[in-house]
Image: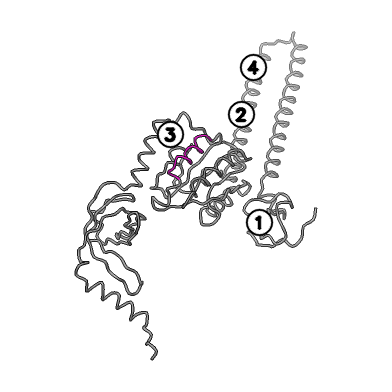
Amino acid sequence: MEQKALTVTQISTYFKQIFDAEEMLFNVRVIGEISGLSVVRGIAYFVLKDENATMSCVCFDTSNFSYQNGDKVILTGTPRYYIKGGKLNFNVQKVEKSGLGELYQQFLKLKESLEKEGYFDVSHKIEMPKNIKRIGVVTSREGAVIQDIINVRTRRNPYIDIVLYPVKVQGYEAEYEIAKGIKFLDNYDVDLIIVARGGGSLEDLAPFNTKVVADAIYDAKKFVLSAVGHETDYTICDFCSDLRAPTPSAAAELVCKNVSEQIDKLKTLLSRLRQSIQEVYVDKFTMFTSLAKDFVRTFDDKNSNNLNTFSKLLIKFKFSAEKFYNNLNSEFNLILNKLYKLNPTEALKLGYAVIKKQNQIKSVDEVNIGDEIIVKMIDGEIGATVTKKEK
């Protein structure tokens, strides 16, 4: 006879009854290390782990919860099976600190060692380049990080190139890929290097807390900007880099200067310069005219020939000064016209477009038949597929 199938609700309810009925599991004490901590609306969610296992935990009372990832703690609580979510959680009633976790202790030990060796010295750090045209990024090809950087670049200055060196940002031997990426871009045609990844637990960020990555950053000749984790996360990568950004998006904001703002500032400076020259011209001419009038009053009829000569010189001076000013004014207008023509947005208004994949495409050699590309125009973007190539 065929056994009757149970519904998901029935089997889940059975699991819950087993845990609820087991008195040995009430108010049990468990020791382990906190990982993946997040506090949402006053409720703490985290994982308690040791060398061989992990356990999901939830603490509803966070009024005295002052722990962080890497803390070794003793929890008092009861396991609960939640039918609707199909998940077993350890409901925490009490938390006691039991020293620092092993991973966090390793982090502190390496940090202290590198600090003594001068890896974090301000004297070793270099300034960010002023004129940035191409950015090298060491991060995962997948995920939101590279897309966030591209989005900020596109909004602020779409004409800055991005060169991605794709790496694993967590897991086995990820640190060697990250170090290799930094070394590669340090010898490539980029103006600076961003090392980036999203937030995560201390284990997730472990590759950025290694000496191999610290060595690669310390030896780099180019400016290195660290954008690892969330604002509250600090890594060895942050301390070694020339500058730390709280998030990958913030890193992109720092290095991608707003084109429109730069043009507006330049126009303001030119306007001030023109005004200053005009003021000097008017002031000097007024002063000269006043001196000339004083000079004329000192003449008598006997010096009429000299007076006529002086008047002619005065007229000639006025004509020369006005011509000089007009020439300067014309040159300023030419410069402004050139600036307008150099403004990429003005080119887009004329019907031109920018073709890009992840970066701007400048040659047909950079695409293949079937590649997905983006065509950026003045009022938006469209997607397209390459069906033909000609030179």
CA separation in Å, label 2 and label 3? 51 Å
Instruction: Quadrant for the N terminus, please.
Output: bottom left
Q: Which residue is mark 2?
A: 279
Label 1 is placed on what type of residue? Lys
> Residue 335's image quarter?
top right
Q: Residue at x 33, y 47 (%)?
A: 102
CA separation in Å, label 4 and label 1? 62 Å
> Residue 193's image quarter?
top right
Between marks 3 and 1 in the image, the one whose residue lies nearer the viewer = 3
The reply, left or right, for residue 139 in relation to residue 391 is left
| Magenta-colored stretch includes residue 215 | yes
Q: Which residue is mark 1?
A: 376
Q: Within 10 angstroms of label 1, few (less than 14), some, or many (20 or more) residues? A: some
Q: Do the numbered discs 2 and 3 sit on residues whose CB atoms are within 8 Å?
A: no
Is label 2 in a helix, a strand or a loop? helix
Label 3 is placed on what type of residue? Phe
Q: Which residue is mark 4?
A: 291
Q: Residue at x 45, y 37 (%)?
A: 240
CA separation in Å, label 2 and label 4? 18 Å
Q: Residue furthest right?
A: 391
The reply, left or right, for residue 134 in relation to residue 362 is left
Is label 3 in a helix, a strand or a loop? loop
Segment tinted magenta in the rendering: 208-219
Between marks 2 and 1 in the image, the one whose residue lies nearer the viewer = 1
